[in-house]
Amino acid sequence: MTEHVTLAIIGGSGLYEMPGLSDTREQDIDTPFGKTSAPIVVGTLEGERVAFLTRHGIGHHITPSEVPYRANIYALKSLGAQRIVSISACGSLQEDFAPGHIVIPDQIYDNTHKRARSFFGEGLVAHVSVADPFCDDLSDQLESAVGLAGGVVHRGGSFITIEGPRFSTKAESKTYRAWGMSIIGMTASPEVFLARELELCTLNISLITDYDAGLIGDVEPVSHSAVIKVFNENNEKLRNLLFGLIEKIPAERQKTF
């Protein structure tokens, strides 16, 4: 590879490009797990060389179940990334996590059932600890950058990943809330687990786009167009968070797995 990056950003629904990147070039990487969702854009942001990948492909044509998660993570690792910041649109399961707020989750519950969840198997065996799936150091650095972003940011919370592409029924939403889940989305798993298998530090920035079905009685059920609308309204906030985070990331990771 001609490029070498230390930070990778995965953009979710509503974040299909990374404004502010300069001196960019595309990397079209073929991996043992197939092609990535889209060509990876490598550029300079806040003086650092970073990689950006749109999770759902150019034009948002890949469903959550069909995202080539293993290819994406493998390719970012092959570019030298040590850290991955994943951005997700998600629904709220708690009244105080309101649309437009940002959550930095510290736990995750995988409720998907169709996806390849591991690089291991077929004679290659390993057991990886994911008791604390997200990187504390990155979360600390992001929390300290919150002042630049404006708005409301919550530290901590449990993120449940559902299969999709449909949204939850009211009964499902009430069940997830009873389980103690804070937010809900369709793509955080298996990204975080695959990143940990490759010894990458990972962080999820979760933008609340809606209250999940039935949580607030007089709120209309979520639609994809509503998700994109809220995401677009908060793109500047997300960019400011990323700019502030990049400024605070040290050259070398403090912890390894």
Image (cartoon, rainbow, N blue to C red):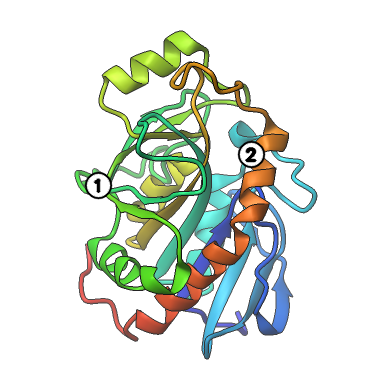
Q: Is residue 139 positioned above or below 221 on the image? A: below
The single residue placed furthest to the right in the displayed view is: 59
**Left or right: 37 as drawn, with respect to 187:** right
The single residue placed furthest to the bottom in the displayed view is: 47
* Residue 36 seen in the figure: no
What element does badge 2 sit on?
helix
Q: Position of residue 16 (x, y in %)?
A: 69, 57
Q: Amino acid at mark 2?
A: Val
Nearest the viewer among 215 and 192 is 215
**Left or right: 110 as drawn, with respect to 67:** left
* Residue 175 seen in the figure: yes
**Left or right: 32 as drawn, with respect to 14:** left
Name which residue lies at 68% across and 85% down: 22
Q: Position of residue 31 (x, y in %)?
A: 61, 57
- Quadrant (top left, top right, bottom left, bottom right) of the N terminus: bottom right
| Residue indicated by mark 2 | 227
Q: Position of residue 149 (x, y in %)?
A: 46, 68
Q: Residues within 10 Å of mark 1 (few under 14, many from 20)?
A: few
Name which residue lies at 64% across and 39% down: 227
Q: Residues within 10 Å of mark 2 (few under 14, many from 20)?
A: many
The single residue placed furthest to the front in the displayed view is: 218
Nearest the viewer among 12 and 69 is 12
**Left or right: 151 as drawn, with respect to 32:** left
Q: Amino acid at mark 1?
A: Val
Q: Position of residue 115 (x, y in %)?
A: 51, 31
Q: Label 2, label 1: how many angstroms apart (C-alpha)?
A: 34 Å
Name which residue lies at 39% across and 49% down: 192
| Residue indicated by mark 1 | 128
Q: Is residue 16 positioned above or below 185 on the image? A: below
- Quadrant (top left, top right, bottom left, bottom right) of the C terminus: bottom left
Label 2 vs label 1, nearer the camera: 2
Name which residue lies at 40% across and 55% down: 152
